[in-house]
Image (spheres, rainbow, N blue to C red):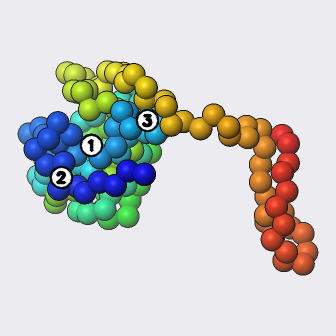
Amino acid sequence: MIVSQLEQLNDTERDVKSETWRSRRIVLAREGVGFSMHDTVIYAGTTSTFHYENHIEAVYCVEGEGTLTNEETGEVHPLRDGTLYLLDGHEKHTVRATTQLRMACVFNPPVTGRETHDAAGVYPLVTEDGADRKVPTTARVGEQTKVASQSGTAGGEEQLSAVAN
């Protein structure tokens, strides 16, 4: 089990700052859990463009207001507390912070903490030795577990059954 307090990351190697944002990397590749998690603040009145060619990122806004622009389509989406966006197509995107935005960000593959955005806003794919050490090796691939009440059976009994695909 890993327990971390955000303030303990302040001014450490896990506290990465730029002119428009600050990202505290709570979980990194070295933890070996298959993802990284960051607490990111985008400063009020700023504009930041990002493009993750090598990572999938899920972003959950927990504070503030702004907009998210998909630079590939021109679509603009409002950002506010409770908004989630998933960059599952490696979309180049721009975040405009009307007020300070605070985001919980999850990356896969996990970042190491050594990445920096290049001129195009891209993180290179940097790997960490042993980063896969906690990835499950005994998962039942190809099997599903279904609760009887979800399969439409009568009686309301909570029976579990394994179904091979």
Identify the residue at image location x=84%, y=66%: 159
Kindly report which numbered mark, 1 or 3, lies closer to the viewer in this rendering: 3
Q: Identify the residue under disc 2.
A: 8
The answer to which of marks 1 and 3 sits earlier in the sequence is 1
Residue 127 is drawn in which quadrant? top left
Q: Kindly tell me whether residue 96 is visible in this rendering.
A: no
Q: Badge 1 local density, few (<14 within 10 Å), some, or many (20+)?
A: many
Identify the residue at image location x=90%, y=69%: 153
Q: Identify the residue under disc 1.
A: 25
Task: From the viewer's side, name the closer residue of 91 and 159.
Answer: 159
Identified by mark 2, the residue type is Gln
Task: From the viewer's side, name the closer residue of 16 and 11.
Answer: 11
Residue 35 lies, with reference to residue 83, above or below; the image says above
Identified by mark 1, the residue type is Arg
**Marks 1 and 2, how far apart in space?**
11 Å
Give the number of the disc on residue 32: 3
Residue 154 lies, with reference to residue 40, above or below; the image says below
Q: Are marks 1 and 2 in contact (CB under 8 Å)?
A: no
Task: From the viewer's side, name the closer residue of 1 and 131.
Answer: 1
Identify the residue at image location x=90%, y=78%: 155
